[in-house]
């Protein structure tokens, strides 16, 4: 297959959310916060399966509050996905209430303790966003079989362009929990704002200023 030098980023519509959830599950299978949420699950394929369930619920919630999902497709399938929130996302309680019927799926995948750890993580992250208006890159994952093809950078460039077009935003904000990703995002123009330690995991808060 011929690699595209400039991967095309598009909206991911709900009919492809299942694929996006599986991509994110595979991409985050060794991510420290996800390991902390899951607890002791030694088999990587089982971790990916459980995370895909969690991400499928997250994507359904994202759709409910009108937040976009962006991605890259290869031969009609999602191979990279990004979950993005705007300046004024709905409160977690208001988003979660219509999805209480999905709670048994989450409990089956994560266990009650895992669900509680996930909620604690979300609470800490939400309370530490920058005060300036920004786009929030909640999740960005590329399927391991499709990495090193510039799909992630293509999505980052797309979000930078969206933020610049708005005119009222300070930039694009994210958190990451691996030193390699810190360097990756710095090469894309992100700056470290500080650190957090939710669930005992070291995480970096990073912002890509619109004028960088």
Image: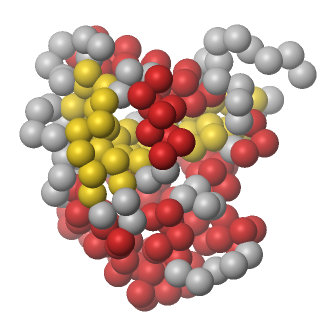
On the question of residue 86 being in view, the answer is: no
Along the horizontal axis of the image, is 61 left or right of 12?
A: left
Residue 192 image position (x, y, % from top left): 29, 36
**Residue at the image position 30 percent from the left and 64 percent from the top:** 197
Q: Is residue 37 above or below residue 25?
A: below
Viewport quadrant of the N terminus: top right
Q: Residue furthest left?
A: 131
Residue 203 image position (x, y, % from top left): 36, 54
| Residue 15 placement: quadrant | top right
Q: Which residue is nearer to you in this view: 130 or 196?
A: 196
**Residue at the image position 23 percent from the left and 63 percent from the top:** 124
Q: Is residue 166 above or below residue 207?
A: above
Along the horizontal axis of the image, is 191 left or right of 76?
A: left
On the question of residue 115 being in view, the answer is: yes
Q: Is residue 160 above or below residue 5?
A: below
Colouring scheme applied when the structure was drawn: secondary structure
Residue 210 image position (x, y, % from top left): 26, 17
**Residue at the image position 60 percent from the left and 47 percent from the top:** 20
Viewport quadrant of the C terminus: top left
Along the horizontal axis of the image, is 104 left or right of 117?
A: right
Q: Residue furthest right?
A: 1
How many numbered discs, if any? 0
Residue 83 image position (x, y, % from top left): 44, 43
**Residue at the image position 42 percent from the left and 28 percent from the top:** 186
Along the horizontal axis of the image, is 52 left or right of 1?
A: left
Q: Which residue is nearer to you in this view: 32 or 11?
A: 32
């Amino acid at each position: 297959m011929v690699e595209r030098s400039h991967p095309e980023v598009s909206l991911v519509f709900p009919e492809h959310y299942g694929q996006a959830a599986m991509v994110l599950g595979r991409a985050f299978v060794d991510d420290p916060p996800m390991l902390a949420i899951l607890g002791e699950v030694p088999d990587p394929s089982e971790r990916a399966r459980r995370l895909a369930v969690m991400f499928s619920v997250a994507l359904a919630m994202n759709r409910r509050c009108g937040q976009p999902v962006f991605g890259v497709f290869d031969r009609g399938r999602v191979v990279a996905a990004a979950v993005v929130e705007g300046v004024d996302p709905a409160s977690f309680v208001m988003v979660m209430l219509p999805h209480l019927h999905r709670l048994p799926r989450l409990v089956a995948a994560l266990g009650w303790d895992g669900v509680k750890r996930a909620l604690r993580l979300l609470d800490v992250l939400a309370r530490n966003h920058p005060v300036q208006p920004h786009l929030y890159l909640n999740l960005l994952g590329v399927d391991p079989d499709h990495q090193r093809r510039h799909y992630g950078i293509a999505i980052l460039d797309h979000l930078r362009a969206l933020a610049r077009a708005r005119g009222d935003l300070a930039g694009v904000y994210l958190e990451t929990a691996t030193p390699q990703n810190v360097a990756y995002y710095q090469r894309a123009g992100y700056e470290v704002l500080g650190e957090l330690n939710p669930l005992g995991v070291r995480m970096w808060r990073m912002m890509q200023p619109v004028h960088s």
